[in-house]
Amino acid sequence: MRRRNFIKNTAFGMAGALAMPAIMAKTETILGHNNKRYRINTRWSQADVARNPVKDCHEMVQDQKGRILLLTNETKNNVLIYDKNGKLLDAWGTEYPGAHGFTLFNENGTDVLFICDTDRHQVIKTTIDGKVLMVLDYPRETEKYDKAEEYVPTETAIAPNGDIYVADGYGKDFIIQYDVQGRYIRHFGGRGETAAHLLNAHGVCLDLRDQTKPSLIATSRQQNAFKRYDLTGNYIETIPLPGAWVCRPVIRGDYLYAAVLQANSQLWMQSGFVTILDKNNKVVSNLAGSEPTYTGTTPDEMYQTIKVFQYPHDVCVDDEENLYVAQWNSGKTYPFKLEPIA
Amino acid sequence: MKQTGLSCVFIMAGCLLAVAQDTFQLSTPLLKYPTVFFEKKASAVLRFAQAGTRIHYTLNGLEPTENDPVYSRPVILKKKATTLKAKVFGAGFLPSEVVEATFFKRGHAIDQVLHDQPDERYRGAGYATLTDGLGGIADHSHPTWLGFQQDKVTLEVRLKKPQKIKQLLVHVLKNQDAWIFLPQRVEVFYQNPGTKEFTWIGTKVLDAAKNDDAAACHAILMPLDGEIKTDRLILKIYPLAQIPEWHPGKGTLGWLFLDEINLY
């Protein structure tokens, strides 16, 4: 990647943005479509780059105190903890060189974290301040793996009963299900020719929007699609998203949000954007991407229209509907914040 | 009081700079076409679904400006070789980079092209790949491409009957991030229909090691050393022998990707 970086991240800019008079705010860039439109703040993070650097910013979550947690593969501080205004509150973690997947679960009132480490070939469960509670090694019980290196977990999702689903998104693309104690239950997905198979199973999440039919949504990134399964791994449907290299699905309220790493039409050219689907799986908004249109029931090919993001990798939606976007391989930029426009 | 006024000016200046820093650039429009090779005419579609923007395009090889035509319907191309260039403009954004493709009228009907075995991952559509009229998609995984990683690739082009030939087109891919480079040299020989002997008729040397990060198709157009009449040509294509220092693959052989041959 030898491309120019159009987004500068400076402390000076932050001060200017705060003092911006209303009349000048009219010139700012509004991203998105329909009822999902946002104002972007590229200078949200107030972290000192000398003290708290980042490499790839892989994923973000919000805890029950309202704090925003970022996972990066910078081993000086794998987890940065911010308030919603971008003030850095705390940092921890030096043991996660392949820090990639980051899931928060409220376990009987207590927040716990699940980290997928693509270098360590492990999933690590920790407390909110980083104390290790459990480590899941490569799933030899599946009889699909000869050694740890074949297993490169990218994401976890935790069911209400505590079952753990791990997506081996950079390994063999299986979804592996464990119980709350970390005991293997089953695996599904994997590579193959049928609709139930996955290709680059980069993310996974629980979909509890229909309380009567809880389901699991997995990413099939190179197929530009999400795939839905029941909680025992039976395939239900494919949600095609032509052109979009979707990362993990993130559900809040009636909507599904996903960072799109890049567009098929401009591979490895920093062509990412963010997509938002309603509860009927219809794309309603693309932030810095093409206005969603449909031919029949399938979206028309989607692509980046504004060079706001480079390689967005995750979206976190906070309790006030603000979005935070973390980026991979994007010049060590800190996350951006997007505020909804009423 | 005066001091306060001054600092207000500084804050205002800071605001202006802050706004200026978030002036984003538009991305390139989608450019879609089935192939860049055509018998009578080609058609290309441009798309850019972003309110308040316009696609301007040219067919004269120059970079589009806001004075050039605004795209509204598929562009029809009929001339022997035409380059379509397009760029998006819109209020409040920096204009996009240029997206482009060059379209070629097909030449003499070629009976077949015999060639070395390509790499097993990049076999295209088999022996018809270089003569099927399909190509011009700058994605090396597209099934229109034959991929080779060897120090010399030899092609034998066979026509049904002898034809007068003035020019030859070899259509290749360049994607240095994927270790695909232009070849460093192409040599052409033709068979004398009477004596059956092969004679040299043209060489083209290319600057294959030049650092250029855009993935793009490239047409190697070779004028021949005088008009010939033949039904058989041999092409010897030499891939880049040593990838240069600045590339992660330095010192190794560059990949060669071919999708079409045309004779005019």
Image (cartoon, coloured by chain):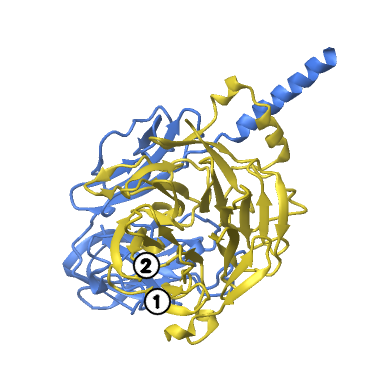
Chain colours: A yellow, B blue
For residue B50, side relative to residue B262 (left or right): right
x, y percent for residue A148: 54, 82
Q: Quadrant of the N terminus of chain B?
A: top right
For residue B33, side relative to residue A162 (left or right): left
Which residue is at the far left?
B161
Mark 2, residue position = A231
Q: Amino acid at mark 1?
A: His
Chain letter of disc 2 in the image = A
x, y percent for residue A224: 37, 58
For residue A221, side relative to residue B115 (left or right): right
Dot placed on the residue nearer the N-terminal end, 2 or 1:
1
Chain letter of disc 1 in the image = A
Label 2: which secondary element: loop
Q: Quadrant of the C terminus of chain B?
A: bottom left
Q: Same chain, marks 2 and 1? A: yes
Label 1: which secondary element: strand
Q: Is residue A266 above or below residue A156?
A: above
How dense is the environment of label 1, judged by Cα within 10 Å: few (below 14), some, or many (20 and up)?
A: many
x, y percent for residue B74: 25, 40
Label 2 vs label 1: CA separation?
A: 11 Å
Q: Which mark is residue A187?
A: 1
In depth, the one of A316 and B108 nearer the eye is A316
Q: Is residue A198 above or below residue A280?
A: below
Q: Amino acid at mark 2?
A: Leu
Q: Is residue B21 above or below residue A244?
A: above
How dense is the environment of label 2, judged by Cα within 10 Å: few (below 14), some, or many (20 and up)?
A: some
